[in-house]
Amino acid sequence: MGNVECGMRNCRGGPARRLDLSLTLRIPHSAFRILFLLLLASRAEAQVDPSGTWRTLHTPHFRIHFRPAYRDAALLEAREAERSYGLLATELHPPRGVVDITLADDIDAANGLTTVAPTNRITIFAAPPAGDHGLLFFDSWLRLVTTHELAHVFHLDRSRGLWDGLQRVFGRAPGLFPNEYQPSWVTEGLATYYESKFTNAGRVRGSFHTQVLGADRAAGASRSPWNATLFTRWADGLVPYAYGSRFLHYLAGAVGDSVVPRFAEATSAQLIPFRVGRQVARVAPGHTLDREWPRGTAPDLAGASAAPPAARVLDSLLRTEPVPRVSPDGRRVAYVRDDGKGTSMLRVLDAATGRPLAAHRVNGGVDYDWLGDTLVVTQLDFTSPWRIRSDLYRWVPGRAWRRMTHGARLVAPGAGGGRLAAIVLGAASGRPTVPAPALPRGAVWEDVAPSPDGRWVAGSRSADGHWALVRWPVDSPDAASVLVETGGSIADVVWTSGGELWFVSDPTGVPQAYRWRDSGGAGGGGGGGAQPLTNEPLGARAPAPLADGTLLYAALRARGWELRRVSALEGARPVTFAKPLPFDPAPAVPISETGYTMWPSLRPHFWIPVFDDAGPTGRFGGPLTAGTDALGRFAYAADLLVSPQPFRASGDFALISSVLGNPTLDFSAWTSWADLGSPPSAPNVTLSELDRYAALGASFVTRRWRSLASVRLAAELERFDYVTIPDTALAAVCPGCDAQSLVGGSVTLTLTRLVNGALSISPEDGIAWSATYRRREEPGTSRWSNELRSRLALYAHVPGLGGFAHHVLALRLLVGGTSGPLGTLFRVGGVAPQGVNVFFAPTLSATRAFPLRGYASGELRGERAAAGSVEYRLPLALVGRAVGHLPVGVDRVWLNLFADAGDAWAPGASPRLTRLRSAGLELAGRVTLSYDFPLSVRLGVAQPLAAPPSGAARRPQVYAALASDF
């Protein structure tokens, strides 16, 4: 379903998990490290704690992994999965093999993830949506998310033609699934289309994507098929879901339901997998993508051409919904302000003037309400390296901020009459903290709000596809009255100071604010009706009544959310709500239960041929494979390379284990051959080096929303041997080539606290520091070495300057020192290498690089080294567009102005820290490949300001590199 859909109310995706492993894998085994990186990235994204006890349910088509604490939810998931499988199989070709589903409950946000390599596997976050309008329209959360993710499996697993032949030879290797090359509007649009077709809800039926399309159309900013992908510019990750699903829904209506399955089949066999338009024309004769796209993505907005209401815009260009909450005295308004440039702020305004009074930084998944003069806030944060929970905080604006709970899983706080209520999340459940109606069982509550006089409670709930607005006496929940029941969604339940009940629903196709009026008087148990309070053409959400009779609400626009103020409609006629559709529970299926079944997903499922030419020492070739189990307890990569003549073998192995949760254990080993050429005294002899290495480490991590602290302990062993061809006495041709064994250990400390916004071009307003100490010895001798290295990076945004993102000033300092007979040299010079770090402890003989642009790599070497860089990073353009019809796009572009300086020296010598110095600039940007794969690149020019000690000419250096220098 994608992280981008997480919490579109006041939730951004959490900070990305960073891989900070210590050794760049040796060239030429780049395929090894890239493959292992992909596996580690998928484990990090899943956000599942694999430690502790897990069980597995076995059904005809699935292995469902779960914790015993939510076995009932797993049993329901088993039935829903088989139901979805049967329905999808009527249209799409069934996937190969058994599908692994991990039902996780480690994050208080609704989402799902799917991958088809190395096996078909799905991760479902079991907590239902809370405040996420994109996902709120469901009949059953598990039904909706399972159908969506399983549609991905059916679609992406399908491989025909050449792709099927390659998979028969190499197995389920990454990159051999043709439908994965399609743009995200195809992959996500197809899954969203089927989630809506095979449930009574879904986002094609819901109003939120109608708002997204309508906002773009009203501004003349509708996306083309080539731009409806995962670019950062608003509406960010919503775009492919909204555009893709509506287009496929339209195409199925215009041509017939079979067009979508035929399209999936056609793309699964095309030799050039990026092409989309050609396959649309093939499966829908007489229709072309360019001609049908504007029709298919046109929003169904009755009355959208009407003049907008006379509303005053209080804030705009916001990335998350600015839900307004008015204090009980009517004098202050609180809302979340997130412009994407930095951290989100909970801001308090003067209700009369709009003047800012106070603000406080907040995390993701934020919701809040006033309890007297105090704001009660729920927001997400890490409670362990694996778990993200929503907890309760209290804040008196202008005074202290206090955390009140830890791991309580509270969302949607509502206050009134001195009472505080909230929703407690669980696996596929959400229940109020106050006494609530017991029936229907299994209802999922979205909102709950006590009345200002403390006598009543109202809330919205979903049960079997029936959304209802419910009201009950605070002490008599069994006397509840269902005021509205509909097949659409109901949200944003609030009370006015006079006791009116307001809410948001979408009976007209877009959300509007409504007031409930009892026919028998306030609080009566008789009939009544819902009267519109707004007539916003593109919809209104989150109404908040003000004392002067006006109201605040959130409106969606082409460039983001707006906070608006308008007069409430008076005398509008009551509306009629659509009746709920029949809901059929998923039928029973054959189920057996065992302990966690790991091996089917963990075993190797593919191999990739790799080669290493070491010249006369040997020309090596062999298979590379990698894998991880469904939970992510183990991830590994291994290769075995053989040289036929001379007959020799080399190989690599890396393993990470999270079976303990915290710490994470890692093991790496290799055997490799290197050609050292011919000794001067024996030109007909080939000298080869055999390097055998092993390392074992343990990493302990603690995390918060913007910070991380870790310590890693490692032990390592390495041995060097030397061999000649033909066999010759080593002492005669290489007197120093004695076998050498080294043992060592290291400890690495890391501390980071950084701010990143959705539009940020750099970390900002924070610090990243690491330090490593390593000791090594040669057994049986008195040779040893100590090494200490440290890296410090500081970031601060520059206020007051324009642009789509903050300007950032960044500073980096690198220092290192080594001592002892085994000490290695540090290298100063060159562009920072951006290799993928896979192995976990530095090799015992490797040099250390200190980048300094404008000079050759290793321009200076020494046992002591220091280098520094200062950069000014300024945003240039938020592009968010493809390059023509190519599967390549430009997301955003910025400029780095930098100055570097550094030196390397021997112990006892006086350092000159500006011995090497340079200045330059880099044009940097984030581009997309294969439509949606993000890649950060930079093209730079650096001018040396001091003559290179090597005697090389002092001329500008032009270079290209990946990612940021720091």
Image (cartoon, helix red, strand yellow):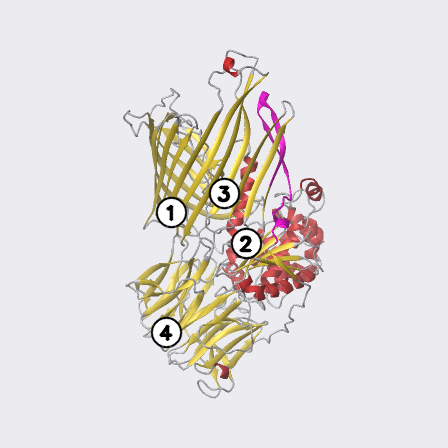
Circle 2: residue type: Arg
Image quadrant for the C terminus? top left
Point out the frontmost of discs 3 and 2.
3
3D distance between C-alphas at marks 3 and 4: 58 Å
Stretch in magenta: 597-625
Mark 1 highlights which residue? Answer: 752
- Residue 283: % across, % down: 71, 53
Q: Are dots 2 and 4 in contact, CB under 8 Å?
A: no
Mark 3 highlights which residue? Answer: 666
Point out the frontmost of discs 1 and 2.
1
3D distance between C-alphas at marks 1 and 4: 42 Å
Mark 2 highlights which residue? Answer: 223
Residue for point 55% across, 64% down: 70
Point out the frontmost of discs 3 and 4.
3
3D distance between C-alphas at marks 1 and 2: 38 Å
Circle 3: residue type: Asp
